[in-house]
Amino acid sequence: MKTLKFLFFLLPFILIVSCNFNLKQTSKSEIVTLTTTDTNSDSLYYVIAKTSNNSEERKKAVSKISFEPYLSDIAKTDSDAEVRKLAISKITFEPSLMEIAKTDKDVQIRKLAISKITFEPSLIEIAKTDSDLEVRKLAISKITFEPSLIEIAKTDKDVEIRKLAVIKITFEPALIEIAKNEKDEEVREIAIKKLKM
């Protein structure tokens, strides 16, 4: 009889606990389903963006994608510059942007990627190595680290690049050195004017 009473009291407790467990399991399942559905839609749009022959269709698909690895792949591989630009405009992961800025053959694509980069060592590398003058100018315009600007102002082969670097320098001893040693008259004048100011 005592065993029966004990089971009678234990049974409601077991039922309450098991119901609570089932409710928790159900809510987790819904979350997983929702997340999976979001990823599936990205995957579907990614397949369209990778396989469609129509660039407008690819652009529409890219506009719906939020998963950055997909966007990065499209930005690096699509044959249409406008599709690549759209993908780049949605990327925030700087290593991907840096890779695009270093490898894409289209100057406008590289400039778009650089416009989104904030990591100065990447900008400095581009400013020193890119083959296009306008791309290098854009990178320099975003650099604030004066030792790098001073190095570029003293060593770069291109006069336009040296000018832009000198314009951004505020450290007077460096400006004095540039004013004394620079071969190009215009660059020297910029350094001297900054000293006068």
Image (tube, rainbow, N blue to C red):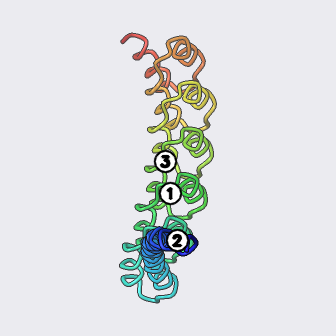
Name the spot of residue 116 as percent of width and height, x first: 44, 50
Mark 2: secondary structure: helix
Mark 3: secondary structure: loop
Q: Which residue lies under the disc numbered 3? A: 117
Name the spot of residue 107 as percent of width and height, x first: 49, 59
Quarter containing the N terminus: bottom right
Mark 1: secondary structure: helix
Q: Residue at x 45, y 38 (%)?
A: 142
Q: Residue at x 43, y 49 (%)?
A: 115
Name the spot of residue 64 as percent of width and height, x first: 37, 74
Q: Nearer the viewer, residue 19 or 144?
A: 19
Pick whichever of labels 3 and 2 is earlier in the sequence.
2
- In the rendered structure, are the residues bearing label 1 and label 3 in contact, judged by CB atoms less than 8 Å apart? no
Q: Nearer the viewer, residue 153 or 86?
A: 86
Residue occupying the far front of the picture: 1
Quarter containing the C terminus: top left
Q: Which residue lies under the disc numbered 1? A: 110
66 is higher (above) or lower (below) than 111: below
Q: Residue at x 46, y 60 (%)?
A: 91
Q: Which residue lies under the disc numbered 2? A: 70
Name the spot of residue 16 as percent of width and height, x first: 44, 70
Pick whichever of labels 2 and 1 is earlier in the sequence.
2
Q: Residue at x 49, y 79 (%)?
A: 43
Q: Nearer the viewer, residue 155 or 82?
A: 82
Cα separation between marks 3 and 2 = 19 Å
Where on the picture, by quarter, is residue 4?
bottom right
Left or right of 147 in this view: 63: left
Pick whichever of labels 1 and 3 is earlier in the sequence.
1
Cα separation between marks 1 and 3 = 11 Å
